[in-house]
Image: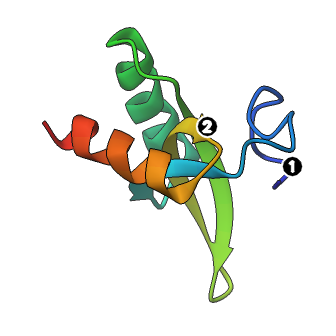
Amino acid sequence: VPSSLPKTVGASQDVEFTVQVASYPTADAAKEHANELVKKGFPAFPVEATINGRTWFRVSVGSFKTAKEATAYRGQLLK
């Protein structure tokens, strides 16, 4: 589990998946999006990632035991 994840995500070995909903070049944009989702009741949080030497700030939602659970939740998010 990346150290940038909130302590509640990945705190158990049962949690392995989240759903990425966006990616931004700035931490502020990712935090703003995550906060908007939290206000709507989604368990969202920003995650820092380095891709090809560049830092991106992803917005992820939830914590799931299986890819199947994460995929099902993704479908709910799209609605």
Above-or-below relation of 34 to 23: above
> At which x and y percent is residue 48?
67, 55
Helix or strand or loop: what does disc 1 sit on? Answer: loop
N-term-proximal mark, 2 vs 1: 1
Q: Residues within 10 Å of mark 1 (few under 14, many from 20)?
A: few
In the picture, measured across the screen, residue 4 lies left or right of residue 13, that is left
Q: CA distance from mark 2 to mark 1?
A: 15 Å
Q: Kindly report which numbered mark, 2 or 1, lies closer to the viewer in this rendering.
A: 2
* Residue depicted at x 43% and y 30%: 32
Name the amino acid type tagged 1.
Ser
The colour style of the image is rainbow
Q: Quadrant of the N terminus?
A: bottom right
Q: Which residue is mark 1?
A: 3
In which quadrant of the rendered view does residue 29 lie?
top left
Side of 54 where 38 appears, left or right: left
Quadrant position of the C terminus in the picture: top left
- Foreground of the two, 22 or 12: 12
- Which label belongs to residue 63? 2
Residue 6, given in percent of the width and then of the height, sits at 76, 32
- Could you tell me which secondary element the residue under label 2 belongs to? strand
Residue at the extreme bottom of the image, as rendered: 52
Q: Position of residue 67 (x, y in %)?
A: 52, 58
